[in-house]
Image: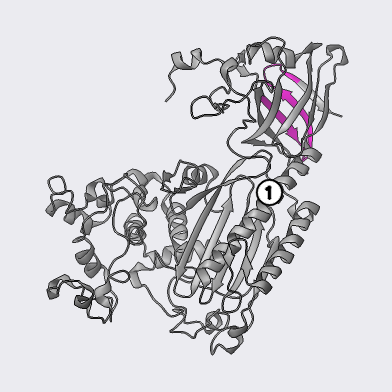
Amino acid sequence: MFFLPVVLLLTRTVNAFQPCSIFGPGFPAPHNLSVSPIFKSASDNFTSLIKSVISSRKSRYGQFDSNTTTFSLQVFSTSTDTPLYEFHHTAPGLEYSGTGVREVDSDSIYRIGSVTKLLTVYSFLNAAGDANFHYPVTRWVPELRAAASSNNSTKYPVEYVAWDDVTLGQLAAQMAGIGRDGSLQGEITQETLNWTGYGFPLLESSSIPTCAAVTLCNRTEFFAIFTGRPPVYLPSTTPVYSNVAFQILAYALEEIVGQAFPEIIEQTMRKDLGLMRTALSIPTNDTFTANGVIPLGLANSRWAFDGGDENPAILRSTLLPPELTLRWMKPVGARTADPNLLAGAGFEILTFTDPSTKQITDLYTKSDNLGIYSSLLILSPDYDFGFTIMAAGLNNLDTAQAVGQLLVDQFVPAVVNAARAEADSNYAGTYISSNRALNSSIRLSTIPSQLGLSISSWISNGTDMLAVSAELVLRSPGSPVNVTLYPSNLKSQASDGGYKREFRAIFEDPTVENPGGLFTNKCQSWVFMEEIVYGRLALDEFVFTVEKGGSAKSLVSSALREVLSRQ
């Protein structure tokens, strides 16, 4: 935490220079990827790459099973209704499968497993918002309220889950500290093996779940079994992957909205979003099976695997307000042992570092492996695009992960470069005051391998504002100064279809050397924003007026209060 006296004592003269952008996008999200030559080149390169990987059966990330594993992938953007790019590979053996498709395409249906967790949270937010995320689960699930009342978790925290301390938000974010599965998966007593031969003791019959092996556990049986399980950690300690958490979350949602979970999913997925080929349970419609990717037949492929009440965690297959979407996706996720992985509410958040710009981009992902099926969803909120990968076959997980990594390596830098090109077209140039007597202007450009809009000249009423910035912001009169504008997500729509868009400036001295280190390597642009204010308006705020087609026609440096028109 930063305290005011500490902030006031910080001086930039001791900060080592490094390109230090604001965390987030370096440019506005691109809206013309479908006609972008940069994106087209990336697509062509990826096609050549993936065909080579399929042929050689190896990639830079290891062996690649294209012989027994079928997969489909798509690249999409929020600015188009159709995929920007797709590729489908049919493994040779699929044509001999007794059921389902013989060749995969965009209409093929895969099982998606734990991607359901994401859909569960999405449906929860759509139906009930996030106001209840801070309440304990015992408020909505009577079985857990009873368990909390009868089990003294305060006195016996090792033996009993403190259900009164577990919130709905912690369930969604994998921070409840509870076990992974119920009796449906993970409970090895359900397998017909002599476990005493493996070193396990003989169990009393009362310790063995009576459901899941032959019949699915109903709600009463599930809670009778799971409330007898000890916790893994105290709530809010560390991420612990739990399928059960989402089953419980679904029970809570049913209580909150007074509707069965299958009906809620039906409303969100099919009626609201139009996803007509998304099903919660085993589809009885022959169209599903006819279009299904089922390499080893219905039973061996686990196509017909049903999770009963555990389906919220293992399901097959524009509604949320923007502020709710931000609250869902942007809070800091809980750290895991992998420094590049955070656990979010339904997401695993992975950090991608662009090898050229060194920009950090958070990728919101959800993956699963269920039998011979794997799925991977990757979203980039910063640039409004993403990927889906679905695989079916003997080595489905390794294949899906390798394809996902190859997609990220190829397309994330390409989309950033396409965004740079659009920003150059839409924002770069010279802006001049209509009152030429004032002698006010600003010149903006983009720089290859750098983020943001760079200011190369900035004059206000005949005064060099770059020199003023060195004195006021850097506190180093006469020093060179780099001023770069980065987009915020603040936009005001106009009646003519245009809008106003805010950018924020970062001021840096490029001559200051970077000593490195944890405390001396200070990339602190976020600390010094709005540091210089003139009449309640910050020197680092710039607002563009943008036409309906996306091209800027003017800008205002808010503190200087002068409209500059783009030439």
Q: The N terminus is located in which quarter?
A: top left
Q: Secondary structure at mark 1?
A: helix
Q: Which residues are magenta?
A: 541-562
User: Could you tell me residue 473's position as x and y percent?
Assistant: 63, 15
> As rendered, which of 444 and 404 lies closer to the eye?
404
Using the image, determine if residue 199 lies above or below residue 475: below
Instruction: Please name the residue shown 46% across and 41% down the image.
Output: 331
User: Could you tell me residue 388's position as x and y percent?
Assistant: 59, 62
Relative to residue 365, is residue 238 drawn left or right?
A: left
Instruction: Please name the residue shown 23% across and 51% down the image.
Output: 163
Do we see residue 276 in this rendering?
Answer: no
Name the image quarter holding residue 528. Answer: top right
Relative to residue 437, is residue 463 drawn left or right?
A: left
User: The disc labelled 1 sits on which kind of residue?
Assistant: Pro
Name the image quarter holding residue 193. Answer: bottom left
User: Could you tell me residue 80's position as x and y percent?
Assistant: 69, 56
Q: Which residue is mark 1?
A: 413
